[in-house]
Structures are given as C-alpha cells and as structure tokens.
Image: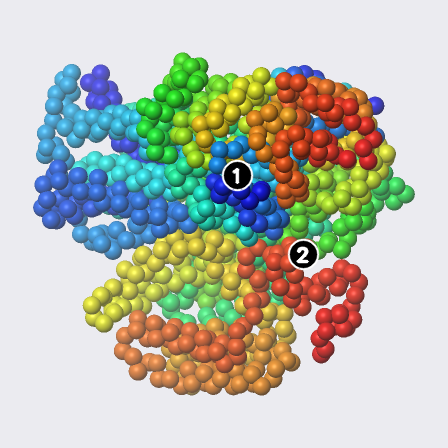
Amino acid sequence: MTVLELESLSVRFGGHLAVSDASLRVEGGRVTGLIGPNGAGKTTTFNAICGVVPPSSGRVLLDGKDISSAGTHQRARLGIGRTFQRLEVFGSLSVADNIRVGQEIRRSWSRRKAALPQYLDGLGDPSPDVELAAILTRLDLVALADQPVGALPTGQARLVELGRALAARPSVLLLDEPASGLDEQETDAFGDLLLQLASHGLGILLVEHDVPLVMRVCERLSVLDFGQIIAEGTPAEVRANEAVLSAYLGTGPTPAPGAPGAAPVEAQ
Amino acid sequence: MSDHVPEPLLELRGVHAAYGSIEVLGGVDLSVPPGTVVALLGPNGAGKTTALKVASGQMVPTKGSVFVAGRDVTGVAPEELARRGLTTIPEGRGIFPNLTVRENLQMATYAGVPLGRVEEVAYERFPRLKERRSQLAGTMSGGEQQMLAMARGLAVEPKVLLLDELSMGLAPLVVEELYGIVAAIARSGTSILVVEQFARTVLGVADVAAIMVNGAVRRVGTPSQVEHELSTAYLGG
Amino acid sequence: MRTFLTATIGGLSTAAIYAITASGLVVTYTTSGVFNFAHGAFSMMAAFMYWQVHVAWGVPTLPAIVLVVFVVAPLFGALIERVIMRGIEGTSEVVKIVVTVSLFVALLGLANVIWPPTQSYTVLPFFNNAALSIFGVKVGWARLIALAVALAVAGGLRFVFTSTRLGIAMRAVVDDRSLLQLNGGRPGRTSMLSWAIGAGLAAIAGVLLAGEQTLSATTLSLLVINAYAVAVVGRLRSLPGVFVGSVILGLLVAYGQQYVSSEAAIGPVSLSGAVTAIPAVMLFVVMVLQPQDRLEARGATRVPTAARMPSMKLALWGGLAFVLVTAALGNLIAGPDLFKVAGGYLFALVMLSLVPLTGYAGQISLAQMTFTGIGAVAMAAWGASGSPLAVVASVLLCAVVGAVVALPALRLSGIYLALATAAFGLFCSAMVFNQQDVMPGLSRQVPRLALGPFKISSDYQQLVLLAVTFALVGIGLVALRRSAWGRRLAAMKDSPVACATLGLNLTATKVAVFALSAAIAGLAGSLAGRTFISDEFGLPASLPVTMLAVVGGIGSVAGAFMGGIFLGAFPIASTVFAANAIGVFRFVSLPVTDLVAFAPGATGVSLGREPDGAAPQMAAGFRAVGESVPSLVVSFAGFAALWLLARLDVVGGWAFVAAVLVFVLAVVPLLPLLFNPEDMGRKLATGIFVGLCTVVTVFIPWDTAIASNGMRALVIVLWAVLVVRTAIGVHGAVPDVVPRGPRTSPDMVGIDTPLTRADAVDAGRVLGIDEDELDLVTGRSQ
C-alpha cells in the first residue's frame, strides 16, 4: 500500500532548480531507498516532504490526501517523521529526555491511539515509561539513557534522533543518512532494525551513502541526480543501470573496460 | 612517491583532523610534485574534502603538518596562503552569487594580479563571461558559474591549485569542458590537487591518483593502476 | 496647502536623518551579523562630542565635523568591533542582542558622566538657522543640508559597495565568508571597516540632530531608535528599503506633528503622544506584513550546556532559606534602606520573568518593565482594597497583552522579537503611561496586598511578601523546567526544526512562554505596593533588566536573583557612596556614583567573554553545599551566629557585612571539601584557617579604621578575596565541580584525554562492573 507519494515535485531556490519534477512512492511495510551523488537534491526532497521548504510545484500525498499546503507541525501530526543529515538532537537533554520530548509532543496533540508501532506488540497502548523503555531497548540505548546527547558520538546521536522520531509514532519515516558514523557491526545491526521496523508496517524512505546497506534493506530504489529521478527499480536493476553509473562515476568519453556496470551484483 | 621526484609543492604529512570529538582524518600523507595533477578520489565521507580544507588552511590539523614549497605552513590562515599563490576553488560553486561577474573577478585580485589582467584572461578563455560581466553571478547557469570559478583559478596564475568537486551537479559535457581547462592550467606548470567523486572524468587528466577511504589514503598510483579499484571503493564490495 | 508643503519638506529632512542612521545600522548588520542596538547611542555620543569640540573647545564648524564624523567615530566603531564584537561571533542571538544593549546602557551612563545632565548643552544650527524660501515656504539651511547629506550618503554607499574592492569584499563576506578568505580577502578587516562606516553614519546623524534641540543623552539615543522601524522595512538588509521606509516614516511623523494637535483626543484617550508612537506602530505593521521566516535545518550545535537543573528538593529548601534569610536581614535594616532593598527584590522578581522566556526557551524581551507597569496600573485600578483577585486579573491582563505583542514577531527570527518588544515599550510610554487616567501626574500608587483581614502595612512586611513571591515563583519555575513542558522548551531552544517535525506548533509554544513571562513581570508590578513614576516603565528602564538578568545567568532562578540584587544595589551604592571617590595614588579620582552609572553596561559588555553568565560558575562552587547536609547545617548556623552577634550589637554593622562576605565567599564553598573524609591533615589546617579568618574579620574595627565608605567597601572585598586565595593555597587546588568546555565523548576517553577514575566508574556502570571490582582492574585500593 502506498503511504507517501510525490507527484512531480519541484523545489526552486532563486534561479536554481534543486528538485525537478520528481515523482516517488513509499510503500508501507517496506524500505524505499533514495540515493544519488552529493548535491543531487535528496535532503531538499526530504525538506519538501515534511514542509520545511515550500515546493514550487507538484504535490505531496499522504495516504492519498494532498498535504502540500500543511505546515511542518501539521504534517508531523498526520504521520510524517524524520531524522536529519546534520544532527538536530536536543543536545542539552539526556537520551531518555530526547525521546520523551517526542512522546510528549505527540501526546499533547493526539488523543486518538495513533497506530501502535509493532515493536510495542503485546503491550497494549503502553504507558509512556514502558514505551520509552521499549524504544531504548530496541535501539540499544539503555546504557546511555541518562547521558546528555551533546556528549555522544555521531552514530549514537543518530540513533537518538531515530528513537525520538519513533516516539511520535509516524506512519512514514524519512531517514537522512542514518548510518553515517556507525561502524560496520553497528551498521549491520541497524539494517536489521530497519527491516524489523518495516516488517511491522512502517513505511521508510532511506537516504544513505552506505551502498551495501541500501542494497540489503531496500526493496525499491530511486536515484536522484541534478534534482531529477533518473532511475527507479529494484537494487539489482538500479545497479545495472548505465545512467546511474555515469551519475556516480561521471561519463568519460569511453567507459573503461571492466567498468562496474559489468561487476557482479551480489558483491557481498 | 619515489625518491628522484623533486621536492613536492604541496605536502601533507601524517595529518589528523577532527570535527569536535569526531576524527575524520587519521594520518593522511599526500604530496603534489611540481607540475603534476593529483586526483584525490574516494567514496563519500572518506575525508577528501577535509584533507583539502587542511591543505588550504581552512582547517587546522590536530596532528601532522602541511608544507607548501618545502615550508611548514601548518596553522597559517587561508587568506595568507591565498595571497601567496595557493588558490582554492571550494566545493559547490566557488563564486559569490550576489556579486556581478566583474565583481567576482575583482575579488580574485587579492592574489596580486591586477583586475585588468584577470578580466583579460577570464574573458579570453570564456567569452560567455564577458557578455555577462554585469550580471549577478547567482543568476547564471551552473556551468557558467563553475566557469567563473575556474576563471579565477586560471587568471591568478597560482603555484598550487586545489579543486574540490568541480563537477558537482553539472552536466557531463560541461564537466568535460572544465577538465579540459584543468589540463590547460596544468600545462602552464601549475601543480593541481583535484578532489573528485566523478572518478572517470578526472582520470583522463590526472598524472597521479590517490584513493582515500575512511580518513586515510589507501592507494596511490597512475590512473590506470587504480581504476579497477574504484568500483569497489564506490559501490561497495 | 502651505502647511502641507511645510510639513512635507520637514518630513523629508527628518526622513533624511532616519535614512542616514538606518543605513549605518544595515551596513553593520549585513556585514557582521550583529544588530547594533547601541547605534542610537553612537549618534548621541557623536552629538555630544561635536558640542565638546565645537562649542566647548571653540573649533570652527567644519574642522569639528570632520574630526567627529571622519576621525573619532570611525575609530570608535572599529575599536568596538575589534574589542567587543569579534568576541561574540558564533554566540547565540540572545547574547549578541544583550551585548549591544549593554553597550547602549554603558554609553548612556558614560555620556552622563562626561556631560552631566545638570548642565545644559546647546549647539547653534548650521548657518545660524538661516532659511531659504522654496515655493513660498521658508526652509532652514540645516534641513536642506540634511537632505543633501542623505543623498550624498546614498550615492557614497553605492559607490563604495559597487566600485571599491573593500566595499565589494564587504558584500562578498555576506555571501560566503570562507570563500572570501580563499580569495585572499581578510574578513576581520572588512568587519572592522563596516563598523567604522556604521559609526560614521551614526555620527553624521548625531551632528545633524545636535542643532535641533538641547542635547539630552536619553532623548537623543531614543530618537535614533526610530530608525530601527525604518530598517525593518528593508528586512534589516536592503539599503533601498531603508530609503523608502525613511520617507514613509518621515512624512507620517511630519504630518502627524502638523495635523494632530497635542490636545487631540479620542474619547478619554489623549493623543498627545501619538506622534511619538508612530515609529513603534509602523514597526508592528511592517512586521505583520512580512512573510513567515523559514525553518532551517543546519545542524544543531551539540555543546552540552553547563547549567544543571536543580532538584525539586533543593528548590524547596532554597526557597525556604531565601525567605528566612530575607526576614532576618530585613530585621537588621531600617527605614529608607529597607525600601531600597525591596526595590532590589522587585527587580529580581521581574528578572525571574525572563528565566522561562530567555533561559528556557531562548527568546528575548526588552520590555519587561512595561509589563510590570501594566500589572501595577491594573492593580491600582482594580484592587484599591488590595484584593488578591485584582492581582490575578492584572496578571491575566499582562499575559494576554504579552501574547498579542509577541505574535507578529515570533513568526520571524529572534532579532525581531527584541525590536518588537522595544517598540512596545516606546509605544506604551507614549500612549499608555502618559494618559491622565492611567497615571495621573505621571505617577501612580499601587495598593498593598490584603489577604483577608491581614493587610501588608509596613516596608518590612512588603519585603517579606516579595521574598515569598520570589521563592514561590522560583520553585514554580524549577518545577516547570522539570516538567514535560519545560523539557519541550529546552528542546525548542536546541532545535526548533526538530520540534516542528515532531508535531510541535512552534509559534503557539513561543506565544505561550512569552505570555507566561509577561504574566510574571505583571505579577511583580501588581505586588509592588509602592508608588511608581511613568519613567520606571520606559524602555531605558527595561534594558538594564534584560541585560543584568542575562549577565546573572539566565538559565537559573539564582541568576535572576543575582541580577536583581545587582540592579537594586546600584541606587543604594549611589546614595551610600555619594560623597566618595575611589582614588588611585591621587592621580585618578573617579566619583563612585559615576562608576556606578557606568558599571552595569560595562558588565553586560563583558558577557562577550562569558556567554553563560555568572551564576552557573558561582553555582558550581555552591552546588556541592546543597548536596551535603553537614555543610548546609554549618552554613546556616554560621550565618545565624553572625546575625545574632550583630543583633546583640557585639559587632558593628560594617564588621557584620565583612564577616558575611568572608563567610559566604571563603567558608561556605569549602565546606563540602572540609567534610570529605579523605586527607584529614590538610582539611583541618584549612578549616582552622578559614575559621580564624572569620573571627578576625569580625573583630577588625572596620567602622573606625577607615574613614571613607568607598575605601572601606573596597578593602573589605579585597580582604575577602585574599582569604579565599590563601585558603585555596593552604588546601591545594579545589577540584572543578562542573567541568568547563565541551565534554569528551566517551569513545575518545583514554585516547585524547587521560582516563580518570570517574570515567572508569562510568564505563564500569555501563558494563555492569561494580566499583570494588573496578579497583582491581585499575590497580588501586582504598
């Protein structure tokens, strides 16, 4: 089921077209990848989805409803959650308090039981403390619960951002380079976590530079270049796409023999 | 680098650098011999841009030193390096969007070349800039903006030129043209360090290629030597 | 028609002066990112300087102008940039605003010292006010000169910014500071130049204004504040916008002066101040018309703040202790001094209103005394009998007014809230507090509170009431900070964009906290129980409140109290030391009152070096005391003993002051260390030393040994500091209670900072090793 859809979205900054006519679907229960070289417009796309920058044309649909004119906080209330490429944690608060703020803001506007996230399965609609504990456990942050986030290394601070976003119980989660700053092992565990979250019904849109991670967790990938979607498909299809390769590696006059296009897909 | 190579014009020795408590460079050694084009390649987050920032004086290394023409310049301010012949064209577009083309060129004169000469060189190489000299630089196309940035690199006749992600967000044809200019600047004897994600384009121009991964230079060699390693570095393996 | 023409020409020449000033403001703001609230004070200083050079020293007009406008003012601007503004680069907007506000206050104080307001200063207008006839309208040469100068400034700025390398570099630095460096430009130099140009333009306006009226530091500074409204038209960045805005404002003011007579009124509301209020109204209208600021996700700074939340227990005990100490102290003080101390407490309460707003939520207000005024006047109108219900009503009124004032500005960035509140303060001075019905004769008595049959009847009871209120509100604020809402405010301060993407309505939250802040300020007014004059509610009265609250350390209730006492102490100090001067070897002699006039601003300016304020550092020293029961007991017992000695006239007043100072500074912070069981030898020595010093202090005949009050105060402070230093010498270094600077991330400990025992314990806790086992690992034993 499609939860989030972009219809020919464009974002213009002065004379610069940062996102141009981009269309994209995010399915519930799956991880969708959005990749592309630096400066391709991925973060701008995120900002347009959650209302931080206004689109110059096109529509954003959530569960089929047009939310293009809603404000940032209204979109959050409708179920869009996100993390940030450049961390936006609450540095002066502890890890637990960061997540609590997410919970408390949700509880301040939502009296309805937002779709219960499945990692809370079997807990009914849990008390905030139980939910907090569940999130901390799920993200492996229990030991750091009382640490001020400002003192954490980037990788863990990113997990705190994720936990905070989960606490708002979104139906779509936008993750902007969540794995940068994690080591190899942590990245593996993080991939498992994403798959688990998705398997419980959450729609995830993932921007990530760690290609192996993207290839592992995403069912579909869109590739953004110069603000345009240049390819869309399964990871294997995208990998074999010549346009994608040239976007990443540049197009020389003649592609070198043995170029990555011919490389076996299952490199791991 | 082998021993018979003359003293490098730019050299990083054991450079460590960090943003706050997060270390990005863990001992980078890199040298740019006179008159060569060195391409610094590698995946995102490898620390290429940070290495360039250390070389241009924008970041002070936590450990290690930077040498220009054999002199230790670690900790020297970027503007002082710029006035002494080390020109940097940074990531994104190295122009001032709210200044006109001509005013942008005037900013290039801090390096010691008079405005008349800067304009002459720039307009000769890029006639399009001459047509647009009173236009605000930010309203030009991406390719034209990058040409303006390159015009500075060309006109101030630097001893060392540092280029960061020249091709970012530009169409392949424009990128090719820009690298043609890089080659021309190299022929005039300037030493060039190019940081690039578009590996294939730059390899045609470079004399030496270095691949950076995880904050260290993993391999240095001729372009043909390193080319097959690139796909693993970029798309995982 | 004739009058219309006269007004138009007059308006244009006023517009010319606005344009000159505002373009200076815009030049410094765009190139250095600091909005210079002291810009008006720059103009004022230049006007006086011109008087000094031209009238007092008799230098002819032209050389005098050249000296002031082209030499002194630019040098002064460059100096300010180099010494003060460079230090606040990269600090929060609140600190930037407060530093320039402090500069404003300091310059105002300095001007009053150099050119005492007791004397009258007049400068003849240019060409002796000769006039020229244009279309049958007589126009003074001074006005024509103003117009010509404005045109010249417009042309000159255009030339500098488009045709000189330095000017282009000043625009380039706005576009991309680091790229300018990579080109070889020196951004530090361009900033200095922009401040020099800004100060020069302020000076031109000052000199042009000098001929128009008798010079008054306050009036001149505030007059130039009108230029802020003009700058807002160009969103503080556009010079053409400034010129358009100036013409609009200049004409509005001129027509207002021409067609609205001073007796005009709408019903009971007098319009006598309407013309003065025009700039403030214009500022609001322009702000309402502007589109909402965009959120930005640039990455939040992740430096953990040093300020810790006090526990509820500490807040409750602290509140109780505060009330008891006040009651004890008040008992010692008599008559008019008691009234002044109560004044300090009132300021402290007003500053407390900034704790949630500025400390928790990171917003700013420059109109807290105006809200105090509204609370006071409402109480006077509704609660003649001192009814608590009237207090509630006054507080609610302030909350509503606060919300309405803040709403337009909160859609925009922090600097606009500062401007909007400043404008609100000016508006109320011009249109509210000068109404006959609101403050008859420009003063109004606030009735004292009556709780049922018990009515506050003495200054002493009033002081205790203020202390109780302060304690209750303070405890409430600590509770607030610990609540879900408090967490949300802290979160919003750290990252507004993250809060929005979690579903928080930022504008509503900011409005709510602003309303709370206005309510607390109003509470202070409604409980003041004394007579106010309208000047106490003006902008010049509000500025030091905000400034000293931030200097005291705005994140904490204690900081607000320190700031309040500080501000309250100035008038006391001025009267006590009225006849004294502090001399250094008889070469330099500064009257203490002058020092006092200048000091508050100077302390605010020093904030550039310590953006956290004073309280967190002091708090670090004293916090440990709150956490150790024996230390608390000894602290209170010692204080009680000293008080008893004073009460029984065993020791004199000055000896009491000196002993309390030594006790608080030297003994109390060391107590937790002294009660620590390790290393007894040293502790004992230190304990004996500080104990002896306290006793010696009590028996030094302070009253008779030194004749001058000022000298005596100075010696007492020096003595206390000496005791502290020596005590630390005896004991050895006192460990930092709160480590300063960013903490090392745990994964770097042992790599770029040495592994300490605390780190090992932390790591152990994470790994589930208990401390005893840890000692085996790290090879230490008890």
Left or right placement of residue B161 versus residue A39 in this view: left
Choose top left, top right, bottom left or bottom right for residue B92.
Answer: top right
State whether residue C297 appears in this view. Answer: no
Choose top left, top right, bottom left or bottom right for residue C514.
Answer: top right
* Chain of the residue displaying label 1: B
Mark 1 Cα shell of 10 Å, populated few (<14), some (14-19), many (≥20) = many
Above or below, C640 against C82 in this view is below
* Residue C645 pos. (x, y %): 46, 83
Which quadrant is the C terminus of chain B positioned in?
top right
Task: Give the amino acid type for the residue marked by disc 2 in the picture.
Answer: Pro
Secondary-structure class at tag 2: helix
Front in this rendered view, residue A124 or A212: A212
Q: Residue furthest right?
A: A122
* Chain of the residue displaying label 2: C
Identify the residue at horizontal 41%, vertical 30% (top origin). B157
* Residue C636 pos. (x, y %): 56, 76
State whether residue C116 appears in this view. Answer: yes
Task: Give the amino acid type for the residue marked by disc 1 in the picture.
Answer: Val
Mark 2 Cα shell of 10 Å, populated few (<14), some (14-19), many (≥20) = some
Residue indicated by mark 1:
B32
Which colouring convention does the figure follow? rainbow
* Residue C582 pos. (x, y %): 27, 68
Front in this rendered view, residue C335 or B9: B9
Q: CA distance from mark 1 to mark 2?
A: 37 Å
Front in this rendered view, residue C139 or A2: A2
Front in this rendered view, residue C351 or B208: B208
Secondary-structure class at tag 1: strand
Above or below, C56 against C775 in this view is above
Residue indicated by mark 2:
C746
